[in-house]
Amino acid sequence: QVQLVESGGGLVQPGGSLRLSCSASGIIFRISDMGWYRQAPGKQRELVATITSGGFTNYADSVKGRFTISRDNAKNTVYLQMNSLKPEDTAVYYCKQTVWGVDYWGKGTLVTVSS
């Protein structure tokens, strides 16, 4: 059974940094594509960044140059390093694991960017 647990969210001032982690269970992590998505209040969930099992990355235009997604297959963990945070980055951030055509979601971690 796939379980995803996000951590690392919190309150940060504009211009600050946070690193989110998503710990995945199961032996299928290394063949999974992983992604971070976010949902702001009153808005639809949107893609932030993805990383394939082979390490190829993709980013939303709004976070390019500020956010970095990475993975550690030995730890079954995917990370999202967020720098130069803006108030508009405030959202619940969700981790997604895709394997064999099936998506699995974590419960999310709240990131609030405010002074």
Image: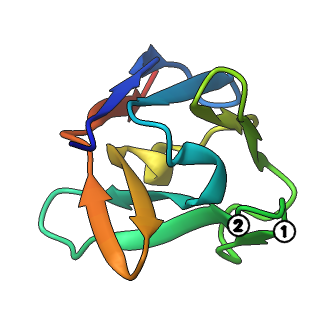
Instruction: Residue at 29%, 31% (x, y): give it.
Output: 110
Q: Secondary structure at mark 2?
A: loop
Query: Can you give x and y, in whole percent of width and height, for residue 16 in the image?
Result: 68, 22
Whether residues under marks 1 and 2 lie with C-beta atoms below 8 angstroms apart, the answer is yes
Is 31 left or right of 8, judged from the image as shown? right
Front one among 18 and 101: 101
Is 43 left or right of 30, judged from the image as shown? left
Front one among 74 and 49: 74
Q: Vertically, is 37 above or below 44?
A: above
Where on the picture, by quarter, is residue 101? bottom left
Is 53 left or right of 107, judged from the image as shown? right
The residue carrying pointer 2 sits among few (fewer than 14), some (14 to 19) or many (20 or more) residues within 10 Å by Cα, namely: some
| Residue at which label 2 appears | 52
Instruction: Residue at 42%, 76% (x, y): give it.
Output: 100
Where on the picture, by quarter, is residue 7? top left
Furthest residue in direction bottom, as rendered = 101
Identify which amino acid the numbered label 2 is placed on. Thr
Q: Vertically, is 115 above or below 82?
A: above
Q: Vertically, is 32 above or below 25?
A: below
Front one among 85 and 24: 24
Look at the image and name its color scheme: rainbow
Query: Can you give x and y, in whole percent of width and height, for residue 104 in the image?
Result: 27, 58
Q: Secondary structure at mark 1?
A: loop
Q: Which mark is residue 89?
A: none
Query: Can you give x and y, in whole percent of width and height, for residue 52 in the image?
Result: 70, 66
Q: Which mark is residue 56?
A: 1
